[in-house]
Image: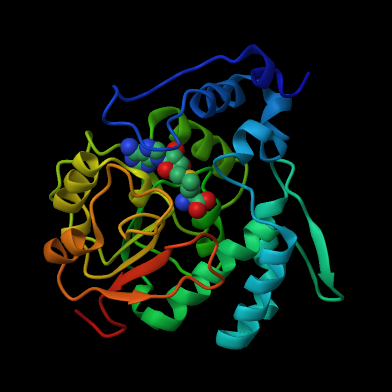
Amino acid sequence: MLFKSRRDKRQTFISREGLRSDSDNGAYVAFVEQTLTDHSLFHHFKKSPVYQQILEHTTEEQGRQYLALICEQAPHFLDLLDRFAVNDLVGGANVIQFNDRCRISPSTLRYAKVASDLHSLFGTSLEGGHVAEIGVGYGGQRLVLDQLYRFRSYDMYDLPPVLGLASKYLESHLLQSSYRTKTLNTHNGEKEYDLVISNYAFSELPAIVQRMYIEKVLQKAARGYLTMNSGRVDSVFSKGKMTLEEIQTLISNTRILEEKPCSAPGNYVLVWGSAGLD
Ligand SMILES: C[S@@+](CC[C@H](N)C(=O)[O-])C[C@H]1O[C@@H](n2cnc3c(N)ncnc32)[C@H](O)[C@@H]1O
């Protein structure tokens, strides 16, 4: 009975039509709402097919590729994998024995790879910084980054029920720094961030919502790291999204990196800012 929502086809939408991201598909939010009240479902939510349509679908092969990239660009991260694997203790993660030293889920390896990219790009300049993450899922990236940095603040932007799940998830762990949950509408746009992160999330929003995030959050951030699956003609999610050119006219000095490993055609990582002091 764990995955009842799959059969009862319940649908919940947060935003009105025209303002919905590709993940706000009815079934996803309905499932997330269920995890808030059904404790046994919460303990296995990462295994749900409805949930895996949106998140937690990284394959074992992709996991191997993330591990190889981490070895290449941040070998000292290998000693931290045990700490990152704290992200697999709750929610029924798909844990795999990759080698003698590494028992971890492919999804946690993806969060670790993003952490190693951030470390390579921005170094220790992030320590003590103010961070925003747009589209946080269950908070896995937040938990992995907590093993590395003590941020002064970390604002998590998502839909209200999804933020409820992320809070429930993070409250079942122990963080060394902190987090706050926010929606775009509850944010007045005045805060200056040292870094904004968004993986497969800002890029899945309709253009009108993307423009508001740019105005209120992205343009206020000294550094950015966005894994994008829209914006190019060959990107999978491009319908109704801003083009890459349009985004680049609104955010100064962006650079485009390949997504490694490339998880879908037309994906890329949009980055700005440096490792130095602002
Ligand atoms: C494909 S998931 C990616 C989640 C996470 N970044 C990861 O890499 O695992 C897309 C995320 O965008 C979130 N999302 C949907 N609409 C949103 C909105 N209006 N503002 C912020 N996040 C939103 C979804 O709830 C989900 O957490």
Q: Is 80 displayed left or right of 54 in the figure? A: right
Residue occupying image coordinates x 45% and y 83%? 120
Image spot of residue 46 (x, y percent): 67, 40
- Quadrant field for ligand 1: top left
Say if residue 41 shows up in the picture. Answer: yes
Front residue of 86 and 158: 158
Relative to 157, 7 lies left or right: right
131 displayed left or right of 30: left
Q: x%, y% of residue 232?
A: 32, 61
- Residue visible at 54% across and 24% down? 27
Q: What residue is at 58 percent from the left and 40 percent from the top?
A: 169
The location of residue 223, given as percent across then percent down, is 27, 70
Q: Is residue 138 above or below residue 33?
A: below
Who's the residue at 55% across and 35% down the image? 168
Q: Between 34 and 86, which is closer to the camera in this rendering?
A: 34
Q: Quadrant of residue 34?
A: top right
Image quarter (top left, top right, bottom left or bottom right) of the N terminus: top right
